[in-house]
Amino acid sequence: MTTQETTTGRVYGGSADPAKHEWEPFEWEEPALGRTDVQGEIAVFRPDGTSGDLLAGFWRYHAGAPGAGSDGSGSIVWSSPLGDECAVVLEGSATITVKATGKQYEVGPGSIIYEPKGLEQIWDIQGPYFKKFWVIFDGPNPTDAASDDLIIANVNDNPDTWTPYDFTEPLEGDLTKGELVILRPEGSSGTVLSGLWRSGKGIAGSEPDGTLVTPYTGTLGDETILLLEGEVHVRNDETGEEWDFTAGDLIALPSGVHVTWTSKGPFVKKFWVITKADLPA
């Protein structure tokens, strides 16, 4: 993973396959158990943001990991106490039970899971291996967006609700670049927006070959990205630093830093999470 300092934050780029030395036991205070628990291993990709408490990285479970059985399976109580979580399953499968309602969800590779802060769940991990990409955000101002359920989707979903991505850039004005679907519209302690975005042949703002060039400053908040398909080039216009990313890579863009995002044709698709600590009314 690489990190680049900027005047208002950091731009991160990394692989979905962290080095062995980057993994460590995942230990946290679990209110549902009234004690500290240690389950699986984490590798942190994004340790901060420009506002609120923002973390992103990977979690894995396997034989030999804390809490796991000899076959890599296990049962975990998790109430997302660190904040709202947005996750994508990369490998393996699990059954998630919402304790208050008894609702159960089967998740596997490609599943998107949105968990509100404080929702008690039981994760039954099916061995031998499970891995997910996660983004957790906690802001200082509680909202009325608390939920008693999960939102479950999939990176391969193709809903009818794709809409052109219209937005206003401070320097470039009104733009239309690609199209998106919003799967999580709000957070419990600040802005948590998340969904899928795509560009390519025949998609709004794209060139005939599918290429799309987007100036972007993240006016809505910090953005954390899992690139699902295609190739992109990102340039930090404040420093001149440049990166090339391919499917499976991670990208973290801080709010307020002007970048130029170039989607290479014929098609690009990403999972995105935008977070921001909202100001009190």
Image: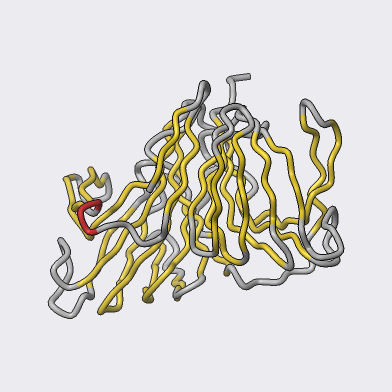
Which of these two is toward me, 275 or 233? Answer: 233
Q: In this rendering, does residue 79 appear at all?
A: yes
Give the quadrant of residue 120. bottom left
Query: Where is residue 73, by image quadrant?
Result: bottom left
Taking the image as shown, residue 18 lies to the left or right of residue 119, namely left
Q: Which residue is drawn at 64% across and 32% down?
A: 237
38 or 45: nearer the viewer: 45
For the rendered model, the colour scheme is secondary structure
The image quarter containing residue 16 is: bottom left
Q: In this view, does 199 lie above or below 47?
A: below
Q: Position of residue 229 (x, y in %)?
A: 60, 66
All told, the count of numbered labels is 0
Q: Where is residue 87 in the image (x, y as percent from the top left)?
A: 46, 57
Q: Is residue 66 left or right of residue 121?
A: left
In the image: residue 48, left or right of residue 163: left
At 35% from the left and 66% from the top, the residue drawn is 131
Residue 61 pos. (x, y %): 26, 66
The answer, for residue 51, to whether it is visible in the render is: no
**Looking at the image, which is closer to me, 110 or 173?**
173
In the figure, 49 relative to 248: above or below? above
Of 146 and 236, the residue lying toward us: 236
Which quadrant: the C terminus?
A: top right
